[in-house]
Amino acid sequence: MVVHPVLLIAIPLIAAFIIPLAKKYGFAIAAGAMAFNMGYAIGMFSYIYSHGKIYEMIAGFKPPVGIFLAVDALSAMLALLINLFAFINFIAIGKEWNYKFSMLYLLAIAGSTGIVLTGDIFNMFIFFEITAVASYALIAGKKDEKAIEGAIKYMVLGSIASIFILMGIALIYSQLKTLNIYDIAARISSMDEKIKWASFALLLTGIGVEAEIFPLNGWVPAAYQGASSGVASLLSFGPSKAAIYAIARIMMVIFPFHATYEIALYVGVVTLVIGELAAFMQEDVKRMLAYSSIGQMGLILIAFSLASQNIQNALIAAFFLIISHASAKSSLFLLSRSPSMGGAACKYTGIVGVLSIIGMPPLAGFWGKWYLMLAAINEKLWLVIMLVFFAGIVEAGYFARYLHKSMGNESKLNLRYKVAMVVMVSFTILLGLLPIAYKMASLPLWGW
Amino acid sequence: MLDIIFAELIIAAIITFFVGKKIASIIAGFISILPLFALIDWANNFGFKTISFGIERQMNISVAGITLHLGITPLSWFFALMILPLFPLIMLYSYSFFKENDGFYPFMLFAFASTFGILLSKDMLSLFLFWEIMSWSSFLLVYRSRDKEAIISYLIFSVFSAFAILFGLMILWHENFSLLLSDIGRINGIYGFIAIASLIIGFSVKSVLMPLHAWAPFVYSKSDEPFVAFLSGGLSKLGYYGMFLFLFTLNGVKILQNYTPNVAWNYLLAVVGSLSAFVATMLAIMQDDLRKLLAYSSIGQLGYIAIGFGIGTPLAITGALFQAFNHAFFKAVLFLAAGAVAYRTGKWKISELGGLAYRMPLTFLAALFAIFALAAIPITSGFAAKWLLYEAAIQQKYVFIAPLMLIAGVGAFLYSFRILYGVFLGENRYPDVKEAPKSMIAAMFILMLPLIIFVVFPGYMLDLMKPALSNSGIESIAHTKFAIETSLAKYNSMAVLITLIAAMVPAFIIYKARKHRITSFEDNYLAGEPYEFHNPSMHAAHNFYKPLKGVVLPYFEPGATYYFEKIYKGIGILSNGIRRIYTGFVQDYAIYVVIFLLAVMGWLIWM
């Protein structure tokens, strides 16, 4: 095998363990590891783009016994997205913090990448734990009252979530004696009906806490508001995207049943509407963006749940929505550090980010909206379509208010922030114009 | 060639980000002439002999894995002819309008390119894509106004309109599984009805039909004048382009009729249009802000086009298209003239202006001429258009619509008289003001040309729209160069003009022969007190239509804006309610998690 996806997880983990030994060079080591990861993720992505899906067995043990990484178009894209944005974001904010921050940041990234790449459900749980623990500490890192409040809320809910995930896995293991996702998928029909549903409910609830779906997202507003803008940016492109992908995979691969899609669809719609409505009157910018993130996660979940019926269009929609949301929201969070959008860089970052989330062409959000509608109209989901439209109009309302309110001439951001913002937001333009996503959506996925 | 034109427009838009304001306006002006060459070339296809530049009629552009089908149709050619020529002239105008280049030209060029794209779209995706580009580029131009109401209402209504259009297009796609517009037509039943209705609602946002006009008074009155001239003159016509396309060219009327044979939906459109014309005119009469007045006037005048589409006879549609063409030019001139006045005086309120005709005679002339067209006075082509519409309404015996149109027509005269009297005539309040810059004057005068040409030769206008009408299966009206013949009457422009001139000349001679005694207003004493020059209550335009105000305003004052504000506030209350779910106590959140788990588990196990 030419590509070794395991390096994407191993290198940041090793670097994170080295950093406490060489405190002085914390930033440099972390930046180096992330630069490597970014390059490697790009390489892996281009390999997948031309060769299709790959897998890797760790230490030569064959599945279902050994640890197993499964990389397909979606996971390669997410791994690239997470590692690329992590590097850009870290270069902007890393210098403001000490070596502990660098270490935790690396752990969060390694965990998120692991969730995306792993083919083993127990490993997924471990990576969730790594990501979550690192995120609690990163949020609390600002050390003021709000930050600690956010971190504690996230920690309480995260702990409950991890227990639920573990219980779900235990139920599956008790029946099938396997942890490999594809092995479970192959034998899911032999499971006891009730235990099967119970394990799905437990997994959905547990991962749903990380994926910010309603009503499991109580921690979101507090955590995003309390965290420093760089960490809020990390949360919006890293763990949350990995978690929503994990839900999609559990739904599509392990439990490909009508009932699960239905639940995901309803949960997605409710999350979308509640998130957007809650953002509508919110005055605090970070809190507003957090609620808006909730809404967008609902939209992505809708796209994934439609993938069961109309896989091509729904997958393209999910690709574009993830790209649009990750690039727009993480740059808007960086921008939220300054109360007003002064200067061309800040102004146009804010505008492009908002327009992409609202769904204006040729930005990625537009294609997300267009293909989501193509997939939804095929199923004649009139109510869902109406609610998506309603949510879109509400979204336009508060984003217009946001753009008006943050109009100004001064900007407190330094050059590194501005560069990071502009680079991040330019991905929504770039990927709106490049036909990568169409090719990616036509590639075979593991087990879908 | 088409793709090159688009590429050049976009490259020009990017260049204008970085250059000075004068160079930007020159680049934008010249680059936007390119599509006009294409229009001249395409005229060969529609029965006119012109020069050929070898620009293709059809083109498929592949971008980002999808194909955009572009091509010219007779309908889009006619609309392009009315919208696109405005742009270079507005650029000429703005050459001296702006103090600095801060993002006006790039977005204007994007709006222009997307307008061209909308007109050329032959499939749903490109129609919607360009429609959205037009939405955001015009939103960013509204964003420059820094006005809260304008920004929020414009974005919300744009998104609403885009979703309504998207919904309609998606249903049409789902019924035929083809994105090409030419494949529409095999659709019947409730889906066809919903699709067409949804499209009409979506387009009527842009064409400011009541009650979806609520954004327009804010946006028109707060944004930069050159942009507003393009928005009102050009972009609003795109809404009517969409309506015409789906109602007549793509057989929307038949789809509606097949589903509900007993309901006259076209009558509803005509009623909405006439109410729009009537109410907006009444509100325009009451405005003191010149821009607000023109905004309401736009809403009113655009309502006439909807009346024409609603009546739906060949005569009415001809009148509506004629009115659309005129409106593009005269409203652009009016907004530009208002901009020129503000450029020199810095004032927008009619009660603070006055007597500018002495200092800005050329601006006055342009505004006067545009007002003639607006009030349908026969020396401009505005008369011909309204005449056709009145005649169509009378012919169909629409007893509700025809009187409303007539009242609105008189009302248009009332408010335009107010512009003349309050802004340009009366005592000269600005003795030191200079005439507007030459580029502005030139732009306004060139924009007046079509209005003059088509009053003398109304037949030419009918020739221009003939391909569009015959392509949609509508017969065009019998006409010669000077005369339009209808079943009720014959309109001969020459006869009307000669009569008018014959009446004007003696009046002018009598006016000149009389002696005029001019006294300064400042000599007056009122009850022993010296007259305060700048007391607003002494202005000629103060409380101008006071009696009318008391009668009319109480009924119209709440208006659609009031109800939309209620909805906005209602959503706000809903939002505040929903935010209570997020109590801030992590114990509650933990309970939510458990409830969710039990709910999902229960649903799955028992369902």
Image (cartoon, coloured by chain):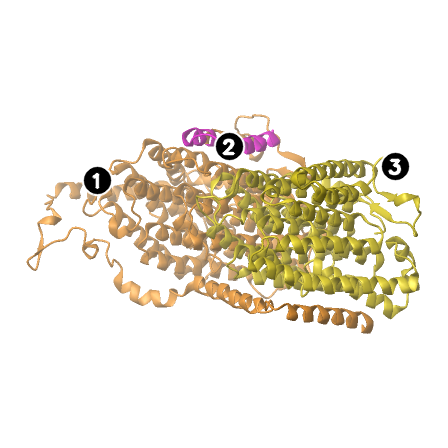
Residue A408 colored magenta? no
**Label 1 chain ID:** B
User: Where does the N terminus of chain A fall, quadrant-wise?
Assistant: top right
Q: Bin the neighbour count of mark 1 within 10 Å (Cα to Cα): few under 14, some 14-19, many 20 and up.
A: some
Q: Nearer the viewer, residue A20 or B304?
A: A20
Quarter assignment of residue A436 = top right
Looking at this view, name the residue that lies furthest to the left.
B528
Say if labels 1 and 3 share a chain: no
Q: Bin the neighbour count of mark 3 within 10 Å (Cα to Cα): few under 14, some 14-19, many 20 and up.
A: few
**Label 3 chain ID:** A
Amino acid type of the residue tagged 1 in the rendering: Tyr
Q: Main secondary structure of the magenta part?
A: helix
Res B89 seen here: yes
Residue at screen point 25% across, 50% down: B352
Location of residue B120 in the rendering, given as x and y in whole percent from the top left corner: 59, 39
Question: For mark 3, what is the residue?
Answer: A1
Element type at mark 1: helix
Label whose residue precedes the other's in the sequence (2 or 1)? 2
Rendered orange, the chain in question is: B
**Label 2 chain ID:** B
Q: Nearer the viewer, residue A61 or B358?
A: A61
Location of residue A108 in the rendering, given as x and y in whole percent from the top left corner: 71, 49
Q: Is residue B341 above or below residue B395?
A: above
Q: Is residue A72 left or right of residue A35?
A: right
Q: Which mark is residue B36?
A: 2
Magenta highlight range: B1-28
